[in-house]
Image (spheres, grey):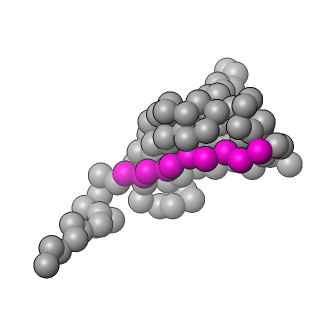
Amino acid sequence: TQTFSLCQVSYGSFDYTSLLYLSDYGSDFTGGRFIFMDQNGNRTVEPRAGRVSFFSSGSENLHRVEKVTWGTRYAITVSFTCDPAHAISDPALP
């Protein structure tokens, strides 16, 4: 079964999403590639440590991640909003 994601639908307030890969496809894990779904053909991002992906989180960037079949895939996801109503306040310093 393939799962499709849409960040803005899944999380509501995300306008942009970024991924920083911390492990390498093929040597640290297999599977786990990031795939943009497109009617003209899918585009695959092969994770490499240090590689950053940045994309808008709307319906123009439907995507999924393959199931990891061996090893461990590490990545940091950071999502951004342009809507002040969904912004996180700066922490208060003592």
Is 66 positioned to the left or the right of 49 in the image? right
Identify the residue shown where x is 29% and y is 63%. Answer: 87
Residue 35 visible, this angle: no
Identify the residue shown where x is 30% and y is 52%. Answer: 82
For residue 46, above or below residue 75: above
Which residue reaches farthest left? 94
Which residue reaches farthest front? 27
Q: How many labels sit on residues?
A: 0
Quadrant housing residue 13 = bottom left
Rendered location of residue 43, percent (x, y):
64, 25
Q: Is residue 77 magenta?
A: yes
Q: Which residues are magenta?
A: 71-80
Residue 12 visible, this angle: yes
Is 71 positioned to the left or the right of 37 in the image? right
Is 76 positioned to the left or the right of 48 in the image? left
What is the quadrant of the C terminus in the image? bottom left
For residue 20, above or below residue 94: above
Rendered location of residue 80, percent (x, y):
37, 51
Taking depth in this image into account, of 14 and 52 the one nearest to the observer is 52
Rendered location of residue 24, percent (x, y):
64, 33
Q: Is residue 68 magenta?
A: no
What kind of secondary structure does the magenta stretch mostly adopt?
A: strand
Rendered location of residue 74, percent (x, y):
61, 47
Identify the residue shown where x is 86% and y is 48%. Answer: 1
Quadrant housing residue 64 = top right
Which residue reaches farthest bottom? 94
Which residue reaches farthest right? 1
Identify the residue shown where x is 17% and y is 74%. Answer: 92
